[in-house]
């Protein structure tokens, strides 16, 4: 009847599940764009969704997605393949046994099957040490799999530095994003810019170890890295507000939730309840800003043998060549140390600019002088040590001493 309120229907969810003798039901009230209410009822007998079936399907082979990720199947049996490049980052949450790790492996192998090591590079941060052990020494890796949370921050800072260098290079060639850069006819010695995907398997471990520092770096990458061809997949078992902070959450509009322990956790990751009633073992909810409603997906199941086969095929074709993170960071330090020379022309220009302001910030210096984040941060440090600006009071703006 038209006069029945939706809230009354939603309140009957548990009663309907009992009447249908269903493990759980999910009410979509209303189905976006329609005047009807939808009911998703779990099957009594579950069927696996083989990863290889989707990988070999025309939906994947003909996909126009730049970075296709295989998620699984929707309730109607349609293959769900999403484009990481359009998201441009993904946040994943799920409790132990929910199927999160299997889904991460399926996404990763999707990318490995699509791109050669020349076109795609990976950075894997795995504090749990076991989830991505199978991928050690594949040619797509820029660094060995990072298992020490303390080493994650330097690696992520290198990503920020690389992002800034790419923006400078693209500006020099007069293009605005990596797609246009790849389409250019460039000199032979022009910098090569493969796509980069950063995978972090347990955000909670990084937040406990490095806290605010890693949060700021992840947020910065999420805000700016899309046009530079850098994307992130960040996962956690603990979707609490001290792990998925407001700063991180606002920069990840694409989110996946597997089964979580409470409504509070579901709201933290998806902004609404529902994930606490999922069935586990690959049952997920996927939200993206381009979709009018949250989609339910049964995750694709990939076996250890399938992962091993793909990894061994890659190793047969190419030997990994790792970058030396310490050498790269030392090189960046040497470049930035130029700023500490009192006779440096740029520093004198910045000093004159700052003295005409009441307040300044790192981002203001970046925009005005077209310099990178690391360089701007070091200038702020020198301005403070020279007594030009006051120490930070917790805000972004720093007052200038008059």
Image (cartoon, rainbow, N blue to C red):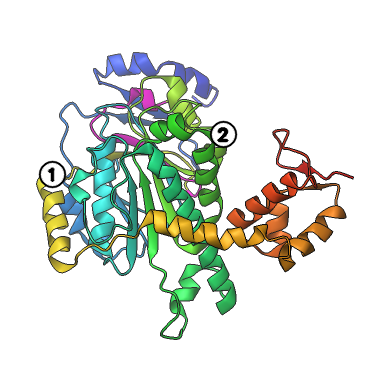
Residue at the (32%, 53%) spot, across then down = 69
Query: Which residue is drawn at the image coordinates 58% and 54% (left, top)?
Result: 374
Q: Which residues are magenta?
A: 274-290
Occupied quadrant, residue 172: bottom right
Can see residue 348? yes
Q: Secondary structure at mark 1?
A: helix
Quarter containing the C terminus? top right
Q: How many marks?
A: 2
Category of crowding for the residue at label 2, using alpha-carbon neighbours closer than 10 angstroms: few (below 14), some (14–19), many (at least 20): few
In the picture, measured across the screen, residue 352 lies left or right of residue 174, that is right
Q: Residue at x 34, y 30 (%)?
A: 94
Whether residue 287 sits left or right of residue 23 in the image: it is right
For residue 246, which numbered disc appears in the image? Answer: 2
State the residue position of label 1: 304
Q: Position of residue 132 (x, y in %)?
A: 24, 44
Measured from the top left, where is residue 298 in percent x and y?
A: 26, 39
Residue 50 relative to residue 117: left or right: left
């Amino acid at each position: 009847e038209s006069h029945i309120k939706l809230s009354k229907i939603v309140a009957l969810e548990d009663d309907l599940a009992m009447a249908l003798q269903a493990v759980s039901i999910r009410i979509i009230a209303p189905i976006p764009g329609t005047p009807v209410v939808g009911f998703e009822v779990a099957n009594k007998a579950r069927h696996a969704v083989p990863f290889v079936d989707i990988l070999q399907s025309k939906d994947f082979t003909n996909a126009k997605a730049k970075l296709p990720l295989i998620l699984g199947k929707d309730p109607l049996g349609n293959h769900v393949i999403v484009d990481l490049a359009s998201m441009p980052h993904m946040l994943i949450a799920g409790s132990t046994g929910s199927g999160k790790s299997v889904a991460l492996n399926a996404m990763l192998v999707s990318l490995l099957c699509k791109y050669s090591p020349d076109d795609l590079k990976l950075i894997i941060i795995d504090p749990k040490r076991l989830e991505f052990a199978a991928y050690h020494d594949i040619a797509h890796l820029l660094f060995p799999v990072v298992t020490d949370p303390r080493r994650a921050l330097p690696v992520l800072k290198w990503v920020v530095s690389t992002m800034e260098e790419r923006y400078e290079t693209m500006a020099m060639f007069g293009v605005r994003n990596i797609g246009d850069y790849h389409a250019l006819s460039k000199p032979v010695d022009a910098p090569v810019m493969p796509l980069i995907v950063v995978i972090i398997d347990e955000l909670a471990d990084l937040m406990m170890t490095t806290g605010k520092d890693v949060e700021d770096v992840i947020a910065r990458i999420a805000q700016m890295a899309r046009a530079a061809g850098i994307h992130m997949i960040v996962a956690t078992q603990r979707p609490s507000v001290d792990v998925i902070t407001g700063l991180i959450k606002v920069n990840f509009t694409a989110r996946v939730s597997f089964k979580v322990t409470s409504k509070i956790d579901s709201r933290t990751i998806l902004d609404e309840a529902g994930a606490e009633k999922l069935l586990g073992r690959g049952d997920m909810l996927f939200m993206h800003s381009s979709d009018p409603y949250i989609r339910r997906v049964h995750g694709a199941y990939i076996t250890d043998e399938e992962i091993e086969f793909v990894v061994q095929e890659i190793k047969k074709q190419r030997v990994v060549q790792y970058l030396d993170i310490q050498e790269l960071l030392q090189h960046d330090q040497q470049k930035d140390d130029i700023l500490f020379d009192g006779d440096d022309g740029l520093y004198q220009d910045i000093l004159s600019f700052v003295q005409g302001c009441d307040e300044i910030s790192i981002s203001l210096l970046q925009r005005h002088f077209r310099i990178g984040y690391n360089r701007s941060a070091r200038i702020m440090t020198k301005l403070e040590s020279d007594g030009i600006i006051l120490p930070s009071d917790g805000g972004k703006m720093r007052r200038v001493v008059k």
